[in-house]
Image (tube, rainbow, N blue to C red):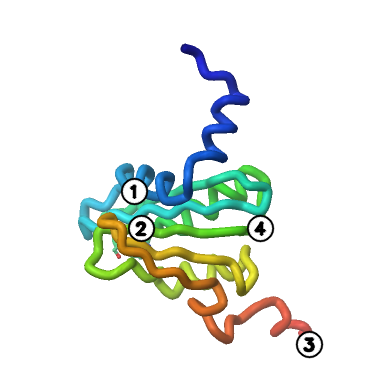
Amino acid sequence: MKFSDHMIKKWEIVMSLKEAALSVREKAYAPYSNFKVGAALRSTSGEIFSGCNVENVAYPEGTCAEAGAIAAMVAAGEQKLAEVYVVASSPQPVPPCGGCRQKLAEFGNRDVKVTLATVEGDEFETTIGQLLPGAFDASHMEDS
Ligand code: THU
């Protein structure tokens, strides 16, 4: 059976953020930490974008899963987050790093739901605002 673009689009919308995050996590390139992370986000158009961490032998050059998912969304011409899901094989649902919290705040309102998860299925629901209270945003530069 051949899938049309329309069918693939439909499937993307039906596929849950959780499935997308678990699936992209498998593709993570994490030979140095061995800590694979998957992030999936839904933009306000309803489309799903995903990303995984991509490490580098020059450690600071590595990028987080959330950054990859955000880059995919922006490259597709979208800039507004509706929901986010992040998953890793960790004892507790994986908390995004500080830099990723700032990156999420750039593209989503304070009330955007963020689900942090383990591959075993433990989930913790939070929001962009709770992850980064007192965030620095464009309003802080109004006088300059
Ligand atoms: N990492 C992410 O991709 N997202 C997070 O939210 C936490 C940390 C990655 C970065 C690095 O490749 C590995 O996990 C260990 O820090």
Mark 2 element type: strand
Mark 4 element type: loop
Instruction: Tell me if 78 is positioned left or right of 59 in this view.
Output: right
First-in-chain label (4 vs 2): 4
Ligand 1 lies in quarter: bottom left
Labels 1 and 2 touching (C-beta < 8 A): yes
Instruction: Tell me if 57 is positioned left or right of 45 in this view.
Output: left
Mark-to-mark CA distance, 2 and 3: 39 Å
Which residue in the structure is indicated by mark 3? 143
Mark 1 or mark 3, which is nearer to you? 1
Which residue in the structure is indicated by mark 4? 80
User: What label does residue 87 carry, if any?
Assistant: 2
Labels 3 and 4 touching (C-beta < 8 A): no
Mark-to-mark CA distance, 1 and 3: 42 Å
Of residues 15 and 140, the one drawn nearer to the viewer in this rendering = 15
User: What label does residue 25 carry, if any?
Assistant: 1
